[in-house]
Amino acid sequence: MRLKDRVAVITGGNSGIGFGIAQEFKKEGAKGVIVGRNQETLDASIDKLGSDFSAIKGDVTKLEDLERIFKETNEKYGKLDILVVNAGGGIGSGTLGSVVETAESDYEKMMDLNLKSVFFTVQKALPYLKDGSSIVLTASIAAHKAFSGMAVYAAAKAGVRSFARSFSSDLLDRNIRVNVLSPGTIETPVFGKMGLPEEVISQAKSGFEDLIPIKRIGQPKEMGRVAVFLASDDSSFILGEEIIADGGVANF
C-alpha cells in the first residue's frame, strides 16, 4: 500500500498504459481521477477500478478542459499527491509520416497532443498539487531510437524527457519531483486502431517481439508498477530522471 490515501490524476487513464497505471495505483491504495476523451471507455474503466476512482471527460489539448479537470478533482478529493501525464499517441489517422511527407497540420497535431499538452497539463495542475508531490510523465523509447515514419512523435517525446529535468529544477522550492517513464512496445488497444486485418496485426506484433531482447511485448500493468515506484516514497531521492521500460530494446 505504497500510495495509501494519496490522490492522483492520470490523463489517458481510460485505456492502455494509463489504465494499467490506474489499476496498479488502486492496488497500492491510491484514489482519484482518470481523464480521457471517450466516455464509453471512461465508464468501462471506472466499473473495473471501483468507487475510489472517478472519471472526467476532457481533451488535454484544450486549456479550458485542463483547468476544469483539476478544479473538479480538487473539489472532490482535495489537493493532489500525484499527477501522471500519460495522454498522447503516435499511431492513427495522419500521425505516421517521414520528413518527406508530413504535412504542417499533422506536425501541429502531433506536437499539440504529445508535447504542448504535457507542458500545460503540468502548469494547470500546479495550484492543486501539494508540496512534495510526484509528477510522472510518459515519454517513449522513440526518444532514443529511430523508427520509420515517427520523426515528429519521437521529437515530441524527446521534449517530454527534457521537461522532466527543467520542471524538476523549476519546482525545487516546492520539493515536487518530476520523472519520466519511457515504455517500449506495449500490448494496448492502439493495435486495434490501426485499421488493419487481425492477421496483419498479429504479424506486426510478432515482428516487434523479434526486435525485443526478451522476446515479448510488454503489458500495461508492468508500466503501472514502474509508475508506482516513481510516484511513491521509494523514489524519494530521484528527480529529473527517466526509466526506460522496453524489454531491453534501447540497450542492445
Image (cartoon, helix red, strand yellow):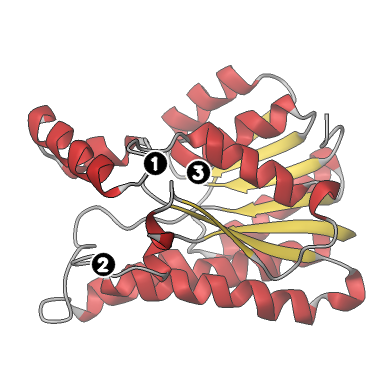
Q: Which amino acid does label 3 sit on?
A: Gly
> Which residue is nearer to you in this view: 53 or 155?
155
Q: Name the residue under label 3.
A: 36
Residue at numbered disc 2: 150
Observer-side mark, 2 or 3, equals 2
For this view, does 47 lie left or right of residue 100? right
Pick the residue in front: 51 or 181: 181
The nearer-to-camera label among 1 and 3 is: 1
Q: In which quarter of the image is the N terminus?
A: top right
Position of 24 compared to 152: left or right? right
Q: Which quarter of the picture shows residue 208?
A: top left
Rendered view: 210 above or below 97: above
Q: Residues within 10 Å of mark 2 (few under 14, many from 20)?
A: many
Expressed as whole percent of the image width and height from the top left, the position of residue 87 reads 49, 53
Q: In this view, does 165 lie to the left or right of 19?
A: right
Residue type indicated by callout 2: Met
Visible residue check, residue 198: yes
Name the residue type under label 1: Ile
**Where does label 1 land, which residue?**
186
104 in relation to 52, above or below: below
| Circle count | 3
Q: Where is residue 105 in the image (x, y as percent from the top left)?
A: 24, 75
Pick whichever of labels 2 and 3 is earlier in the sequence: 3
